[in-house]
Image: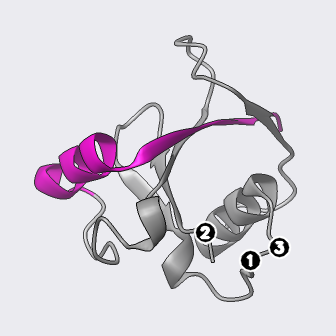
Amino acid sequence: MARYIFIESNSGYIFGDSADLKGITSDSSLQEIAAAIDAEAGEFGRTYDVLSRNPRTTESGYDVWRVDVGGSEVVPVVRDGQDQEMIDAVESEGEYAGFVAIRS
């Protein structure tokens, strides 16, 4: 199953790891994973658009990194989303998958 890590664009912190979310399957879209991350934080009713890159504006959203590169996990399951070493590892070892913009 593809594994994605979502880094919140404004804070730069990891907000979610698809390996650690209930109800996520190999068929789950990036929008569905973002909704699951937000639901865990108590945010409901948002809509999402997937863009190929971060627009580098004040737009809220998530930079998404795929971390099951070449059939193996390149980083362990995230336990501390503010750990700078983990953030750096995701960004250097993972493959950029796109930007999930939060629309509402």
Q: Residue furthest bottom?
A: 22
Amino acid type of disc 3? Asp
Q: CA distance from mark 2 to mark 3?
A: 9 Å
**Is residue 50 among what the camera can see?**
yes
Q: CA distance from mark 1 to mark 3?
A: 4 Å
Q: Nearer the viewer, residue 17 or 27?
A: 27
Amino acid type of disc 1? Ser
For image coordinates 48% across by 33% down, the residue present is 9
Picture quarter containing residue 72?
Answer: bottom left
Q: Which numbered disc flags the more N-terminal residue, 1 or 2?
A: 2
Does the magenta portion include 80? no
Q: Position of residue 87 (x, y in %)?
A: 25, 50
Q: Nearer the viewer, residue 93 or 61?
A: 93
**Is residue 68 among what the camera can see?**
no
The vertical placement of 4 against 72, above or below, is: above
Picture quarter containing residue 11?
Answer: top left
Q: Residue furthest left?
A: 85
Q: Residue furthest front?
A: 70
Q: Residues within 10 Å of mark 3 (few under 14, many from 20)?
A: few
Q: CA distance from mark 1 to mark 2?
A: 6 Å
> For mark 3, what is the residue?
27
> For mark 1, what is the residue?
26
> For mark 2, what is the residue?
2
**Image quadrant in which the N terminus is located:** bottom right
Q: Are marks 1 and 2 in contact (CB under 8 Å)?
A: yes
Q: Is residue 8 left or right of residue 31?
A: left
Q: In the rendered view, how is the structure colored?
A: one colour
For image coordinates 87% across by 57% down, the residue present is 45
**Image quadrant in which the C terminus is located:** top right
Say which element carries label 2. Answer: loop
Please provide the residue range marked out in magenta. Answer: 82-104
The vertical placement of 64 against 16, above or below, is: above
